[in-house]
Amino acid sequence: MKPVTDTYNAQRRFFDSSATRSYAFRKAQLKQLKKVIRRHEAAILAALHVDLGKHPMEAFGSEVGLLYDEIDHTLTNLRQWMRPQPVSSPLLHYPSGSKIYPEPKGLTLLIGPWNYPFQLLVNPLIGAIAAGNCAILKPSEMAPHTEAITRQVIAEAFDPVFVTVVTGEGQEVIPELLRHRFDHIFFTGSIPVGRKILEMAAPHLTPVTLELGGKSPCVVDASANLKTAAKRIIWGKCWNAGQTCIAPDYVLAHETIAAPLLEHMKAAITQFFGENPANSPDYPRIINHKRFDHLATYLQQGHVEAGGGTDREQLYIAPTILTNVSFDAPVMKEEIFGPVLPVITYRNTDEAVGMIARNPYPLSLYVFSGNRKTEQAFINRVAFGGGCINNTLVHFTNTELPFGGIGYSGMGRYHGRSSFEEFTHMKGVMKTATWLDVPVKYPPFGNKIKLAKMIMK
Ligand code: NAD
């Protein structure tokens, strides 16, 4: 595939020219990105509506507004992040000074999923640019209208020798691209494809960030404010019709409050989307028929407590709550990634922690509780990427918080300073003055070990 090789070679030459390194260049490119996104904002929201039925309010909040915040936060802090950082040096090597130099990595490949097809590709791009890298973006082919507008935005904002978009089927385009040596790969998508990306990166030993999925539990303990918990859980589950990597996947409800919690959740669905959510302009659709058919099978895997309605033609699945669900059912073994919410009861914290361990290393954990000890017990005992106490999803929106998974939910982190660091090599350099040359490190060693032991005790 010659064009890919040409693009790669052109970017390599551009990066090697050092054009991307200065603060002025990075700042100008970030400002340009924001300007062009703003210019095409209406078209981006329209594309997201066609691809996923997202209401403009939802699309703006989660796909565009977040990017404005991320760019502004980066512009405010970039000069300081770029500064070489002095650190102390060991006495043994006196007179020395040490500094950490943040270095751009080079050529980056950013691969996006279909569920937030604009934001999840452009957000890592902000980090890649801030860190002084070139980038090739590969949007998901499953959201074709957003793919097209992404290509247009990037082409208008940047010279392709700096940032460009490559489109096509993932399994064809990505292996072709990865025959070349990239300096960093940033992948957002599913666990099986993430594994393939790691394999393809291995021959060149390219570092990889993997932002994957998994089953994110939502625990509601007996002391929680149930009405607020219900609203925030249903909001988080129905945002993008559950097609969110950090959506609450299932609820673990303490047995003493499960019944009232269910009632509050049903009331929240009606409050948000009316008696028939199919008629609500605020409720999105499933991405395609393949995903629809798979999600529909979950509806038979428990007792339908609320919802359950579907319309295949419209790719509509109602916000659905399931009870009497077995941990052995596929709905409790697979990442749901749709508007189906199993609710399972637990008796005590130990039991809830054990239930979560059946699907270990969730990307997110949500705990609803009025008890600080309970909060801390879950934070300390469960390995998870990030999460919220008494809320869902919103940790993603805080540029001060690192976002990323652990174990099966991924590796690496981004947002704000973490994005800058993810795309940066921290080069450590020690400089030693020549006016003194302490001889302790030179042979013959004789009894110098005594001095070394005094210094390095
Ligand atoms: P996916 O893994 O199917 O696709 C992601 C990207 O990989 C796409 O651009 C696709 O073209 C490409 N791709 C597909 N098959 C490939 C192959 N064989 N070789 C190389 N590239 C290939 O994921 P998806 O269905 O688009 O997204 C859904 C998944 O992403 C869910 O598991 C979700 O949890 C996860 N996700 C994670 C995050 C996060 O931030 N951690 C965010 C959104 C989605």
Image (tube, rainbow, N blue to C red):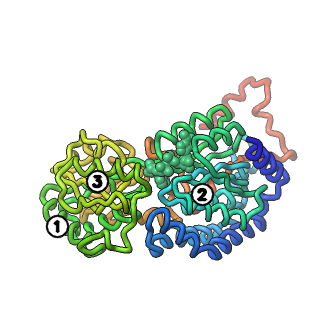
Residue pointed to by mark 3: 250
Residue pointed to by mark 1: 263
| Tag 3 secondary structure | strand
**For the point 38% across and 73% down, which residue is it?**
282
**Cα–Cα span, label 2 and label 3:** 28 Å
Mark 1 Cβ and ligand 1 under 8 Å apart: no
- Visible in this render: residue 104? yes
Of residue 62 and residue 367, the one placed in the foreground of this image is 62
Task: Indicate which disc residue 16 carries.
Answer: none
Answer left or right for 450 relative to 190.
right
Task: Indicate which disc residue 124 carries.
Answer: 2
**Cα–Cα span, label 3 and label 1:** 16 Å
Q: Which quadrant does the N terminus fall into?
A: top right
Mark 2 Cβ and ligand 1 under 8 Å apart: no
x%, y% of residue 141? 56, 52
Of residue 428 and residue 311, the one placed in the foreground of this image is 311
x%, y% of residue 384? 40, 49
Q: How packed is label 2: few (under 14 Cα within 10 Å), some, or many (20 or more)?
A: many
Of residue 69 and residue 438, the one placed in the foreground of this image is 69
**For the point 31% across and 68% down, which residue is it?**
278
Q: How packed is label 3: few (under 14 Cα within 10 Å), some, or many (20 or more)?
A: many
Mark 3 Cβ and ligand 1 under 8 Å apart: no
